[in-house]
Amino acid sequence: MPTLTPSLPARSFQPGPFERLLSAVAASSLPLLFIVLWSSGYVAGKLALPHTGPLTLLTLRFGLAAVVLIAAALATGAPWPHRARAWGHLAVAGLLMQVLHFSCIYFALQWGLSAGVAGLLIGLMPLATALGAHLWLAERLNLRQALSLLGGLVGVAWVVMGKPMGGAWPAYAAAGLGLLGLVAGTLYQKRFCAHMDLRSGAGIQMAVSALAVGLVAWPSEHFAVDWTVELVGAWLWLGLVNSIGAFSLMFIMIRRGLAGQVASLFFLIPGVSALMGFIALGERLSPLALAGFALSALCVAAAAPSRR
């Protein structure tokens, strides 16, 4: 009769120093990668716009992202919304965060706004979201957030004064409206789409956004595209890396309980965008504008929730 070897008690796996190092590097690289991907979108948009119209570029960007996300959702068996109301909420959030936000930003870039200043205005998103949550969701706005919001607006004013654009003030107004679209979409998604699946939910939002922008782009821009290497590269970067990659990283960090860290990361976006604009586009800022960037960054960092 064969001898049975007694089973040994299961031992829990204890990661060694190398595994702990890899885990720490992966955790620390997510915020850095998020900053680079999010900031790069303004430079890529600036590079693509000389070759096509803003709405046509957005149709290409959203359409590519929608195809990839929906294919991934179908291939991996992602859950889809069961009620028409949930589909409607996803559509509204997508129209605000994607269509209104990026349409205004792209028109502002086409009208002369620099990539760095665009990054600065969007970098104020945590402060503007805190104010919007106070007004719409009845969330408390503490004194630190109120003072930071005021200081951030002063910093923006310094940048505007230090980088005059002559009669191109509509570009600033469009970028400000784009910020409002991003903030309104973020608050709406927080209220009505908090439990959406990343693959199917984002795929729905991108598809609705591509259809909405395309319906306007056809009669106004006739989908005129100058297919250059620069445009194709920018389009692939915007559609795959920026729309899918940056959004996914933000979603992953929030899911891991790092919402406060995500908010604090936005204070780095204006500086990184300005640096990318300087390297790739030759954009320069005056000393007063640099001081405005620094003040706004400090205000966003001061208002971010503390990490434990």
Image (tube, rainbow, N blue to C red):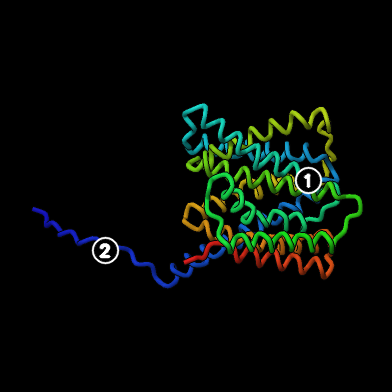
Q: CA distance from mark 2 to mark 1?
A: 60 Å
Crowdedness near tag 1: few (<14), some (14–19) or many (≥20) residues, C-alpha within 10 Å? many
- Is 156 rendered above or below residue 79? below
Crowdedness near tag 2: few (<14), some (14–19) or many (≥20) residues, C-alpha within 10 Å? few
Task: Indicate which label's residue lies in the foreground, 2 or 1.
Answer: 1
* Circle on res. 11: 2
The residue to which callout 1 is attached is 174
Q: Is residue 233 visible?
A: no
Q: Position of residue 138 (x, y in %)?
A: 53, 47
Element under label 1?
helix
Q: Is residue 207 visible?
A: yes
Element under label 2?
loop
Instruction: Report whether 129 appears left or right of 152.
Output: left
Amino acid bearing label 2: Arg
**Which badge, 2 or 1, is on the more N-terminal residue?**
2
Q: Nearer the viewer, residue 50 or 227?
A: 50
Amino acid bearing label 1: Ala
